[in-house]
Image (cartoon, helix red, strand yellow):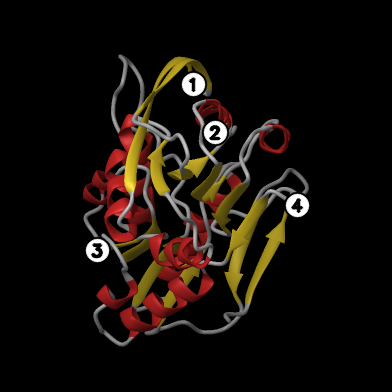
């Protein structure tokens, strides 16, 4: 672990400093860039400090890459936030990026530096297998996640169903329909993130109405903002399985947190030793 000190000013400004030499070394800076924006600023300032201290390689390890939902112009006069964050990280000094389950795979193309894109499936699939569920069906809570759901179903040799949703506005679902049969099935919903939990809980309730025996969800990044925990507790979800890519706001009997530390540690070691990281992927 590096020796880093943060100086805080009374107005909220902060300044990181390395209290040891990093000249000519390989530095790994670990931190998710979830809101508030202080997490992003902390990463940017640390990258700049490492660059100006003459570190040889500076790898930004982002278990959760924030602002990834802004990966395109979906209406006029809006930014492409994910592209801007990528450029900021590179300008600050990152020579490599390690991250997990980007909201959209094409975000890798926003970087000019190498990106190691990891998948939480290597964490989730062994846990799902340990449940020994019969009549298993994998589900996607929306059309955009169908590719991920199909990858899980291929590995687990299960059926697939898709939820089709229409949004009234961000984080508000106007209508949801189910494509496929879930009667008599144990369902695993798969998604890259859970924010307000509106989509997941609505999907779970709909599936139980259609005859599903149980509904669980695996989501890599647990934003869980607003009244998400309350929704989960009141829903038909039997269990929500997430990683610790984002610190949990509170504990819940329905939320199981699986650590992603060993996955990132193994990849960081491989990167440092210039070895392949392919062995860390169960599915791609």
Residue that carries the numbered disc 3 in the rendered image: 114
The one nearer the camera, 62 or 8, is: 62
- Residue that appears at 52% across and 55% down: 32
Q: Residues within 10 Å of mark 4 (few under 14, many from 20)?
A: few
Whether residues under marks 2 and 3 lie with C-beta atoms below 8 angstroms apart, the answer is: no
Give the total of numbered labels.
Answer: 4
Choose mark 4 or mark 1, whichever is in front. Answer: 4
Q: Is residue 172 visible?
A: yes
How far apart, in angstroms, are the residues tagged by discs 2 and 1?
20 Å
Residue that carries the numbered disc 2 in the rendered image: 204
How far apart, in angstroms, are the residues tagged by discs 2 and 4?
21 Å
Residue that carries the numbered disc 4 in the rendered image: 251
How far apart, in angstroms, are the residues tagged by discs 1 and 3?
32 Å
Residue 170 spot, x, y in % from top left: 49, 21
Sequence-first tag of 1 and 3: 3
Quick check: 174 left or right of 103? Answer: right
Q: Is residue 93 visible?
A: no
Sequence-first tag of 2 and 4: 2
Residue 220 spot, x, y in % from top left: 48, 52
Choose mark 2 or mark 4, whichever is in front. Answer: 2
Choose mark 3 or mark 4, whichever is in front. Answer: 4
Q: Is residue 110 above or below residue 197?
A: below
Asked where in the image residue 58 lies, by quadrant, the reply is bottom left
Sequence-first tag of 2 and 3: 3
The one nearer the camera, 78 or 190, is: 190
Residue that carries the numbered disc 1 in the rendered image: 170
């Amino acid at each position: 672990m590096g020796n880093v000190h943060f100086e805080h000013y009374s107005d909220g400004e902060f300044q990181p400093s390395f209290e040891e030499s990093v000249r000519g070394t390989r530095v790994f800076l670990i931190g998710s860039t979830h809101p508030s924006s202080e997490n992003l600023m902390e990463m940017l300032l640390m990258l700049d400090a490492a660059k100006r201290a003459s570190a040889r390689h500076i790898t930004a390890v982002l278990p959760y890459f924030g602002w990834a939902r802004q990966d395109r112009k979906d209406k006029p006069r809006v930014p492409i936030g994910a592209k801007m964050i990528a450029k900021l990280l590179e300008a600050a000094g990152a020579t490599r990026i390690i991250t997990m389950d980007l909201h959209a795979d094409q975000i890798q193309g926003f970087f000019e530096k190498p990106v190691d894109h990891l998948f939480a499936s290597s964490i989730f699939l062994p846990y799902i297998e340990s449940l020994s569920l019969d009549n298993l069906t994998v589900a996607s809570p929306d059309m955009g996640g169908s590719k991920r759901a199909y990858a899980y179903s291929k590995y687990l040799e299960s059926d697939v169903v898709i939820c089709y949703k229409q949004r009234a506005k961000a984080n508000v679902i106007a209508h949801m329909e189910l494509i496929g049969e879930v009667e008599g099935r144990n369902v695993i919903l798969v998604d890259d993130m859970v924010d307000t939990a509106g989509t997941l809980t609505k999907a779970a309730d709909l599936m139980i109405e259609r005859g599903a025996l149980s509904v669980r969800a695996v989501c890599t990044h647990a934003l869980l903002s607003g009244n998400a925990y309350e929704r989960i507790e009141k829903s038909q979800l039997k269990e929500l399985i997430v990683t610790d890519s984002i610190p949990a706001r509170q504990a819940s009997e329905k939320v199981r947190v699986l650590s992603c530390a060993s996955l990132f540690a193994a990849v960081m070691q491989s990167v440092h030793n210039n070895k392949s990281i392919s062995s860390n992927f169960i599915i791609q």
